[in-house]
Image: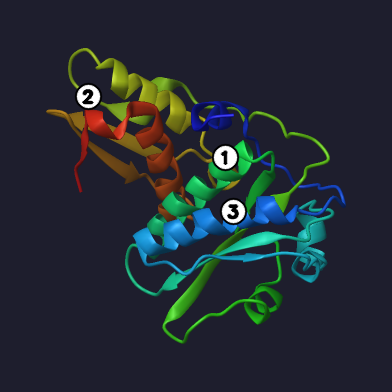
């Protein structure tokens, strides 16, 4: 499975089997995490065989079952952390999909104190959220989407790469499926913006990664 197929086939999964992540699969995932950390300056960590973070009332309220492994998104406090965590977290989500694993972004319905106890977090660092990971009881279901026209602003005909980027972005997971983002095109440069809502900057990083994969990094420049 390549990353384009992963974008199309990956859906959020909340219930997992008791199958453990194999050592070779975990090693591949750790390698990609190390690459993301080196590139971003984040301190993303994989925690395996640790079910207690998802045994709380909140986790049951969130309909999570059988979660015993997760990716903790951690980085230095400051502006841009949430967006960066979303971008690199989604890179890991899609990579995990190519390995045959299932995932779900989790911002609230897990025990932060338990997670922190199993991670290395400095005083100047923050646990943004986690990504549940493992072998799903199902492959999840596609989410509903708003009309494509609500996600972009541009004048004149759209380049094919821009349309392909939008198609990939629409498939990205967002908090409560709010899809509050906007892409603007100007002279071959693209600006991505959050348009409100909870965890909007985290979502912005997620959808920006999807757009980049769909459009092709060689076809445009980001406008900040």
Position of the N terminus by quadrant = top right
* Residue nearest the viewer, comparing 82 with 27: 27
Residue 180 seen:
yes
**Label 1 vs label 3, nearer the camera:** 3
Task: Classify mark 3: helix, strand or loop.
Answer: helix
Q: Which residue is mark 3?
A: 29
Q: CA distance from mark 1 to mark 2?
A: 24 Å
The first of marks 1 and 2 along the sequence is: 2
Q: Position of residue 195 (x, y in %)?
A: 37, 44
Q: Which mark is residue 154?
A: 2
Q: Position of residue 2 (x, y in %)?
A: 53, 30
Q: Residues within 10 Å of mark 1 (few under 14, many from 20)?
A: few
Q: Which colour assignment does the render follow? A: rainbow
Q: Which residue is mark 1?
A: 177
Q: CA distance from mark 3 to mark 2?
A: 38 Å
* Residue nearest the viewer, comparing 90 with 56: 90
The residue located at (67%, 50%) in the rendering is 25
Q: Which residue of the protein is positioned furthest toward the left in this rendering?
A: 187
């Amino acid at each position: 499975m390549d990353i384009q197929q992963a974008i199309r086939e990956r859906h959020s999964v909340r219930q997992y089997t008791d199958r453990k992540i194999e050592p070779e699969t975990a090693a591949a995932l750790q390698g990609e995490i190390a690459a993301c950390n080196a590139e971003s300056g984040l301190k993303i960590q994989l925690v395996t065989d640790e079910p207690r973070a998802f045994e709380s009332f909140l986790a049951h309220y969130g309909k999570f079952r059988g979660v015993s492994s997760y990716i903790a998104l951690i980085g230095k406090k400051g502006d841009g952390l949430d967006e960066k965590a979303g971008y690199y977290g989604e890179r890991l989500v899609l990579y995990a999909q190519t390995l045959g694993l299932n995932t779900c972004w989790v911002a609230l319905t897990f025990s932060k104190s338990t997670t922190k106890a199993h991670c290395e977090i400095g005083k100047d660092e923050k646990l943004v959220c986690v990504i549940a990971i493992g072998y799903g009881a199902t492959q999840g279901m596609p989410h509903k989407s708003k009309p494509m026209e609500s996600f972009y602003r541009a004048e004149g005909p759209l380049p094919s790469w821009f349309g392909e980027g939008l198609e990939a972005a629409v498939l990205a997971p967002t908090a409560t499926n709010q899809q509050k983002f906007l892409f603007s095109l100007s002279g071959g440069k693209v600006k991505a913006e959050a348009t409100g809502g909870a965890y909007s900057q985290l979502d912005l990083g997620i959808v920006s990664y999807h757009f980049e994969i769909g459009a092709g990094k060689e076809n445009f420049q980001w406008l900040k």
